[in-house]
Image: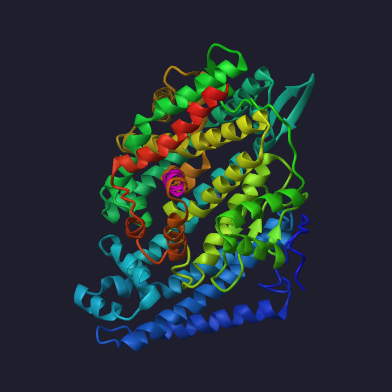
Amino acid sequence: MTKDSNQHEQSRWSLNDLFPSNDSKELERAFTSLEELVTKFESRRDDLKDSLLSETFIKIIQELEEITKLVQRIGGFAELWFTEDTQNQSAQAMVAKIEQLSAEISNRVLFFSIWWKSLDKKTAKKLLKGTGDYLYWLEEMRHFKPYTLTEPEEKIVNIKDVTGSNALITLYDSFTNRYTYTINVDGEDRELTRGELMTFVRMSDADLRARAYQELYRVYGKDGPILGQMYQTRVRDWRNELINLRGYKTPISARNLHNDIPDAVIDTLLAVCQKNAGVFQRFFALKARLLGVEKLRRYDIYAPVTQSNKEYPFEMAAELVLDSFEQFDPRFAQMALRIMNDNHMDSQVRKGKRSGAFCATINPELTPWVMINYQGHSDDIATLAHELGHAIHSLLASDHSIFTQHACLPLAETASTFGEMMLVDRLLEKEKDAGVRRDLLFKQVDDSYATIMRQAFFALFEKTAHKMTSKGASVNELSEAYFDNLKTQFGNALDIGEEFKWEWVSIPHIYHVPFYVYAYAFGKLLVLSLYKQYKEEGESFKPRYINILSTGGSRAPMDVLSESGIDIRQGSFWQGGFDVVEGLVRQLEELS
Ligand SMILES: [Zn+2]
């Protein structure tokens, strides 16, 4: 039975489409058949010769696809179950078990990709013919040919990573996740988590904002030398493996190849960001004026200047989001509705539930799962639109295989960010209250700052830090370099407290996935530019946009975009994104 489309309740999701429960026969059977599939796949090793027939080649890929699907289904169940209740010991244990199992399976099937990469051009070309949807996935694998080691070496790297680099990152997480922060609020000392502490930097009390940041970096700074050492170890490991052993040109080019984006494009992107630092400096100057201070402090950049305190019940939020999707294309609304009707959304706030929000796509045949913690603020509606945007992206690309459904990282945020913008547009259209309108515009620029400039400057710092570490720089020298980076970013627009020199040791991303962050800036600027095109062109833009989304990860990002008339090698393209932000800042300057 499907629910009526106009009653959307805040709900807990069902994982039934994966497995009925953690102790079900179905799950037990899945483990057994996974083992059988992998064993069978291992026997394919003898088939892998230059004389391999195309049909057999496809068959082998399909077998690997089955294995991948099953691993994702079991792993997805564990992850989502753990998300529901992070205190559940059985769920924790299952997540750990699956992690180990996945690493083992990756090693057992590794011979296939190694063989595929080792083939000469001519043989590979012959086999690529007729691979259909697998084509780009196969081609992409071969991009790594020059950087791949022998099978025993690759296995050693994998195994040593579990207790080496990965373990270091886990230690960093465990170490910093148990930090507590003490802050005096209304005459009372309160002990808080980082998440709780950070809510104060968005509050109207200027002194409290400052003290929250000072406390954050007091705690991180106290362990700064150790956390910095952990970072430098990570950075050295990155260099040892990726540059010295595998032969990448620079630390960032390893990430660029994973994203299938040429180094020069990222250089251009980061240069354009640096050039446009002034746009946000203007925004901060405006914010200072609205807050009635001469100059903003770094503590104040998230200070609220909101004029209204509107709250939205979940039902209303769901309606607003669906309505804005409907305006763009009724199919978008239907797909979003499917997430709710299939009971694949967990929107409740519960004790023990993971914080934040995400969309999990397990495989192309299954409706994605969406997790949010809905509390009724306008931010929460934006999050709802964002995660449903991800789900729509997955559903539009569900004709592809499990290897080609997911868009590569720089394109992964396209539908989500675009979805948010459709919502904001709809809200601006409906909203007559000047205060609410100004709030919405403010939030847009706030988000753009956090997604574009902040991340671009992290990436610029990473470049510096990797270089400096290779030349033997100390942790303190990195802190100084970080502080310089902040000064370039904020110019004269902000006063920066000295403790911000420790900010970098508090950014998990630069430890977890080096150079990941530029993808945020890439994605957001790309969407701003696309949105600008949509506003200018209207209907004729839609098929091109839908084409980008439904391509998923089945083609190179450069190709998909250039087919839609977008040349990301040009600085002017990225500048177009900044022009949109500049336009928003101008509107705000006029409204204020
Ligand atoms: Zn997202």
State the colouring used for the structure image: rainbow
**Residue positioned 50% across, 32% down in the render:** 584
- Extreme-top residue of the structure: 294
Residue 63 relative to residue 290: left or right = left
Q: Main secondary structure of the magenta part?
A: helix
Residue 74 relative to residue 561: left or right = right
The quarter of the picture where the N terminus appears is bottom right
Please give the range of residues in magenta: 526-534
Q: Residue 115's image quarter?
A: bottom left
Is 532 a magenta residue? yes
Determine whether 153 is above or below 401 in the image. Answer: above
The quarter of the picture where the C terminus appears is top right
Determine whether 198 is above or below 313 in the image. Answer: above
Percent x, y for residue 488?
A: 39, 24
Percent x, y for residue 565?
A: 33, 54
Q: Nearer the viewer, residue 358 or 83?
A: 358
Percent x, y for residue 61?
A: 41, 79
Determine whether 509 is above or below 8 in the image. Answer: above
Q: For the image shown, how many numbered marks are present on the structure? A: 0
Q: Nearer the viewer, residue 242 or 57?
A: 57
Determine whether 444 is above or below 21 in the image. Answer: above
Is 248 a magenta residue? no
Percent x, y for residue 142?
A: 30, 67
Q: Nearer the viewer, residue 33 or 70?
A: 70
Whether residue 476 is visible: no
Residue 66 relative to residue 210: left or right = left
Q: Residue 133's image quarter?
A: bottom left
**Residue positioned 37% across, 48% down in the render:** 238
Whether residue 311 is visible: yes
